[in-house]
Image (cartoon, rainbow, N blue to C red):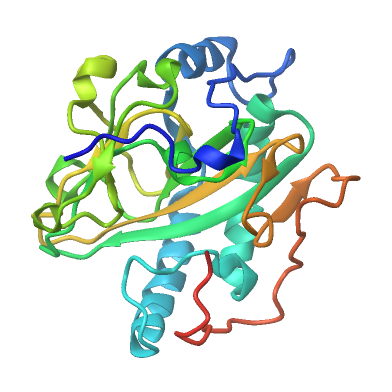
Amino acid sequence: MTAKIDAYPDLNRDLRFFPLGTENPKKLTNHQIQHYNEKGFIAPIDIFGREEIQAIRNYFDDLLPRAMAAGWNNYELTNWHKHCRGVWDIVTHSKIVDYIQDLLGHTIILRHSHFFAKLPNDGKRVSWHQDASYWPISPSKVVSAWLAIDDSNESNGAMQVIPGSHIKAQVPYTDSTKEENNVLNQTVLDPTEHGEPPVPLTLKAGQISLHSDWILHGSQPNTSKKRRCGLAMRFLSSDVRAHLGWNQHSIICRGSDPSGHWANHSRPPGELIPNRGNSSA
């Protein structure tokens, strides 16, 4: 297999890791911010209490079967914050955005949201990859927040990370093979060459992890009888620029964007299941 190094060679992206953090953090400790910059992640962080996350789980338990009845599969609920009031309310929730502000500063833009719902014994894995490798954006100042809607552990396919791998920024990858049964389509073949041994991010429902857009991460198939659902949210600072229309699905969660580069989708009036033909990138 031929290794690749840049999915968008014509865009002249700045393929570096940029340390993040504010001078006077309100929610994160200075130690946590240092850990993010040195290791590439922070986990776990308590966000929602038992009743709050149960309400979110009940919401998703209703949303997923309606989505699947409309022809979507359990990995295709992407950017539904544009259509569903309940999703918009989660991705803009102050309990999440407050933590993001300690890394990105006052202006916070949600570029993308994606439910990863591993059904029991569904056989799908997420091969080792870097988020920023997929994205036609620059500079690379994106924080991914992963909200556990269900408990996430090694038996049901919890995310794993390679600490320190973000420092190198872009590493070589190959196209995934059919045999991998990968949810995505890129694979880094030798992840531990780029950092420390893998660390599983075990989360209780209602907790989040934060990780750099450059950290190598992935997850094994769910071999348990319990679902593993999480909502991935990609937050960035206003100086980031997107190409190829990847600025059209965003929400300005806090602060402002005088440049007008980023779309700012308002809270949807209801719970619209989009037509299967109108895929959201």
The residue closer to the viewer here, 84 or 180, is 180
Name above or below for residue 248 compared with residue 166. Answer: below
Image side of residue 221 versus residue 116, left or right:
left
Image point (52%, 84%), residue name = 273
Tell me residue 244's x, y (percent).
62, 56
Q: Is residue 208 visible?
A: no
Residue placed most toward the observer, 172 or 158: 172
Q: Position of residue 13 (x, y in %)?
A: 59, 33
Residue 181 percent location from the top left of the image: 15, 57
Q: Quadrant of residue 61?
A: bottom left
Residue 7 at least partly seen: yes
Q: Quadrant of the N terminus?
A: top left
Residue at the extreme right: 258
Q: Quadrant of residue 33?
A: top right
Residue depicted at 37% across the width and 79% down the height: 72
Above or below 55: residue 71: below
Write the residue at 17% across / 58% down: 124
Figure label count: 0
Looking at the image, residue 65 sits to the left or right of residue 125; the answer is right
Residue drawn at (60%, 33%), measured in percent from left and top? Answer: 12
Instruction: Reply above or below: 76 against 28.
Output: below
26 or 270, nearer to the observer: 270
Q: Is residue 95 placed above or below 87 in the rendered structure?
A: above
Where is residue 189 shown, x and y percent of the image?
A: 18, 32
Is 220 on the left or on the right of 133, as rendered? left
